């Protein structure tokens, strides 16, 4: 792999020091602003992590045509314990090829099959719904992350003619569906709600009334796997009805499991319940393997470079990553500091504050350092 100033090849270091190695890929647009701030906050916790930055993204692609350097994913899996990512998407790259190869490449080729997207409201003031408090918005969406329409299987026949045909296949494998559904039941067993109450329900969301082949597989597997967890309530909703319920009464959800595309769509809606895309965190997980953590938002080109992007989604993502790396105390400190920032309005404008990206993150980093 070629090297850049910041990027150096890692010699495999002994894992017994407790030190964790994290690859940092800020990417494009506001990713380049929020990720350095999340890194500052990680450093303020004093967690024993070694961070190595990589310049994968649109600038690099436009400079030398590289999206993912040769051996890139194998290197990440071999040399790092986790990956912290910003966002990919740049108006200069019309095909979005770099985002597809880097972001979807990591998810698919590293087989990070569980996209874990927690939905938590930190303060009532951030929720657009009337009378909804933090205890009412506390659930997680588990999105299948390696299949579905995202495989981009299909093609174009007679392109550019009046007879053009475009197909986009929805690929669902028994193995892929079963492992994410099983992950959902295990997640429910292993997690409590923020108020300490047990997580009781797993809700599977699909569109099996219209898409009967894939939906049929999801329905059958869900029924089978739920039978192994009789102490957990198994529920089902069609994705359209789920969207309405999420807005009408978000209190009813604990764990939602769904396919790749529905998971993408409902997590932007769910981010709206939390205060917007600037507040939403996520992890791309394969248990036991190097996993990748990224805020739910994209590169937001219109606001990039203006020091206005909300860094809290990226910072909460860093906390999620630290918890995954077993830095529980450090993760808790970050979450407490973000909560304090929200309550004291030490935030960016999108959630009602007056601070810039850097200033809001610095407030959090300072608080973390004091805590
Ligand atoms: P986006 O998430 O970038 O922006 C959607 C809206 O939310 C915009 O109004 C934006 O200003 C706002 N927003 C997003 N993050 C914010 C933050 N941290 N603080 C304040 N406001 C924030 O989605 P989009 O506009 O649909 O896409 C822009 C580009 O990002 C596209 O190229 C898209 O493909 C890409 N994208 C990448 C990822 C990723 O890499 N994970 C995710 C989503 C979109
Ligand atoms: C996300 C993004 C990506 C997705 C895009 C950039 C391909 O929207 O992470 O939510 O659809 O998964
Ligand atoms: Mn999305």
Image (tube, helix red, strand yellow):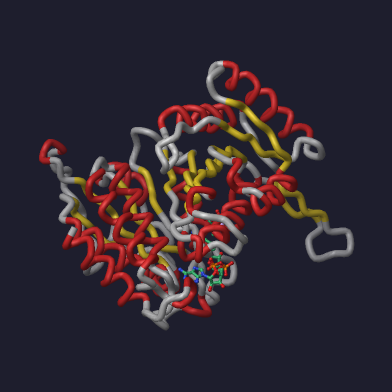
312 horizontally vs 165: left or right: left
Residue 199 spot, x, y in % from top left: 49, 33
158 horizontally vs 54: left or right: right
Image quadrant where residue 178 sits: top right
Residue 121 spot, x, y in % from top left: 48, 55
Pick the residue in front: 300 or 281.
Answer: 281
Image quadrant where residue 254 sits: top right
User: Please, is residue 35 above or below residue 202 in the view?
Assistant: below
User: Residue placed at 78% from the left, 38% from the top?
Assistant: 211
328 horizontally vs 117: left or right: left
Pick the residue in front: 147 or 36.
Answer: 36
User: Please, is residue 204 above or below residue 69 in the view?
Assistant: above
User: Please, is residue 284 above or below residue 126 in the view?
Assistant: above
> Can residue 29 be seen at all in this image of the molecule?
yes
> Can residue 71 be seen at all in this image of the molecule?
no
Outermost residue toward the front? 131
Q: Quadrant of ligand 2?
A: bottom right
């Amino acid at each position: 792999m070629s090297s850049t100033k910041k990027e150096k090849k890692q010699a495999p270091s002994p894992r017994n020091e407790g030190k964790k190695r994290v690859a940092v890929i800020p990417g494009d647009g506001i990713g380049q602003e929020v990720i350095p701030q999340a890194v500052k906050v990680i450093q303020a916790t004093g967690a024993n992590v070694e961070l190595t930055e990589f310049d994968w993204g649109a600038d690099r692609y436009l400079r030398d045509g590289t999206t993912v350097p040769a051996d890139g994913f194998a290197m990440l899996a071999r040399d790092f314990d986790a990956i912290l990512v910003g966002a990919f998407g740049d108006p200069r790259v019309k095909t979005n090829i770099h985002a597809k190869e880097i972001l979807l490449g990591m998810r698919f080729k590293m087989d990070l099959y569980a996209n874990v997207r927690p939905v938590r409201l930190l303060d009532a003031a951030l929720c657009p719904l009337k009378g909804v408090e933090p205890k009412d918005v506390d659930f997680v969406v588990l999105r299948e992350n390696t299949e579905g329409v995202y495989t981009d299987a299909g093609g174009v026949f007679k392109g550019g003619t009046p007879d053009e045909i475009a197909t986009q296949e929805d690929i669902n494998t028994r193995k892929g569906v079963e492992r994410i559904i099983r992950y959902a039941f295990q997640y429910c067993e292993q997690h409590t709600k923020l108020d300490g109450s047990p997580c009781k329900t797993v809700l599977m969301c699909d569109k099996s009334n219209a898409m009967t082949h894939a939906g049929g597989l999801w329905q059958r597997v869900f029924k089978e796997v739920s039978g192994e967890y009789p102490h957990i309530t198994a529920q089902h909703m069609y994705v359209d009805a789920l969207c309405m319920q999420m807005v009408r009464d978000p209190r009813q959800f604990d764990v939602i499991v769904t396919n790749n595309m529905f998971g993408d769509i409902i997590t932007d809606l769910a981010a709206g319940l939390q205060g917007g895309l600037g507040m939403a965190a996520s992890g791309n997980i394969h248990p036991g393997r190097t996993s990748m953590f990224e805020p739910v938002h994209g590169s937001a080109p219109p606001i990039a470079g203006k020091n206005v992007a909300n860094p809290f989604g990226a910072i909460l993502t860093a906390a999620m990553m630290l918890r995954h790396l077993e830095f529980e105390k450090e993760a808790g400190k970050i979450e407490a500091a973000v909560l304090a920032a929200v309550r004291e309005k030490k935030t960016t404008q999108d959630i009602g504050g007056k601070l810039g990206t850097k200033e809001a993150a610095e407030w959090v980093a300072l608080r973390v350092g004091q805590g």
